[in-house]
Image: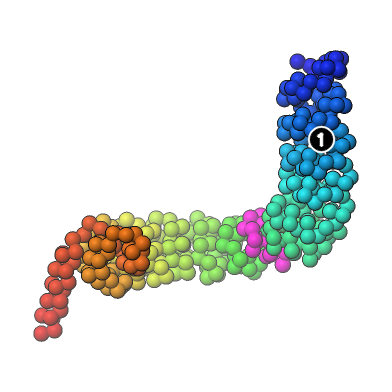
Amino acid sequence: QNAAALEFASEELRGDGLLILEAMRKHGASVLRFATPALLASRHTMVRAIELDGFALTFASSVLREDAVFCAAAVRTNGLALEKASDSVRGDYDVVDAAVANEPKALRFAAPAIRLDRKFLLNAIARDARVLKFVAAKFRDDREFLLEAMRLNGAALAFAPEDFQSDHELVLEAVRSSDAAIKSVPQHMRADSAFMLQVTARSAVAFRWASAGLRGDRDFVLHAMAVDGRVVEFASDAMRADRAVGAEAARCSGGAALRLLPIELRADVDVVKAALERDALALEYASDDLRADADIVLFALRHNGLALRFAAQRLRTDCSFILQAMAQLGITVEELDDFRRTVLDSDRQAMSPVCEFAPLIEGVDLAKLVDEMERARSLLSLGLR
């Protein structure tokens, strides 16, 4: 009930590893101050103690605090326990690396040689951006060091000195490796249209952090979409509902942009056609009515026969639409028949593009396709006469 009572316990009880460990579970590592020196030097007991709380290293014998393997186990549980390791262990790269991986603040307790090791610091920042907050001032004020850090982990921008968070080149490097880095940029830069266009060129997602004014500026949004139509996702509601904006997004990025538009624009023939010209598989994101529209589906099939996958059910089983898709893909009925007769998956996969198209018409009678082809030839022949 009261850990302090151990101070008055017999030496036998204070040397009982199981009793001390049980007390640790209830009261934390501080109970080890009442343990006997012999117990604090027991590797078996102290290993179990640091598994419960890395701060147990504080009370370990000097021999154990000189032991790099033992200390590494402690700092993996609690990185700040590095403070209690011996000087030689705090100069051990593996131990310090384990401590900093657990808690970036542990870098403060590393030996000077490690805290001034550029390569070690950059590797640590690449893993955890927060490390930059604890590196020596000489590195935090070193623009070249910061540039390299941003290339490795853009999230480190949040922990760079405030003056450097307004450095255009630094910010652009940060955004290149982490979309979220733009969140750390001052508001006045996120309202700068020229700068934000550069940012957008590196990351469409970063557009979401542009100022509200820019995300609602039609000219700016159109310029940004010329770089990547997907930025429409983060434009203002008014811009996302703008027909011209939607059409431009679809033209630039096809289905990747069409899927982000409101349903009203995904039901707009011109917007959908703009997307299909870029990527016929964008048919997947058109409204249900347009995926059942014969003209729209044929428009898509002329660009990519595999778009049949996204047509309405009645059109996917219509022989004339199937034949249009086959013509675009250069597939014959004979090849489809061979595919259906093939047993081994490995052989089927070698029959591209048949292997992609055949499953789309799995239930269709090939004989009906042949009949439809003959009928079409007959009509063509009559027309020629």
Tell me where residue 129 appears, x and y as whole percent.
71, 53
Neighbour tally class for label 1: few under 14, some 14-19, many 20 plus, Cα within 10 Å: many
In the rendered view, tell whether residue 237 sits above or below residue 88.
below
Numbered range of the magenta stretch:
167-183
Q: Nearer the viewer, residue 351 or 254?
A: 351
In the rendered view, tell whether residue 199 sits above or below residue 112.
below
**Residue placed under numbered mark 1 in the picture:** 57
Residue displayed at 86% across by 23% down: 36
Residue displayed at 50% across by 65% down: 229
User: Going by the image, does 262 lie left or right of 209?
Assistant: left
Rendering quarter of residue 15:
top right
Tell me where residue 2 appears, x and y as whole percent.
79, 16
Q: By what rule are the colours in the image chosen? A: rainbow
Residue displayed at 10% across by 85% down: 385
Residue displayed at 31% across by 71% down: 329
What secondary structure is the stretch in magenta mostly built from? helix
Which residue lies most toward the bottom here? 385
Tell me where residue 25 appears, x and y as whole percent.
72, 25
Q: Nearer the viewer, residue 368 or 87?
A: 87
- 283 in the magenta segment: no
Rendering quarter of residue 46:
top right
Q: Quadrant of the N terminus?
A: top right
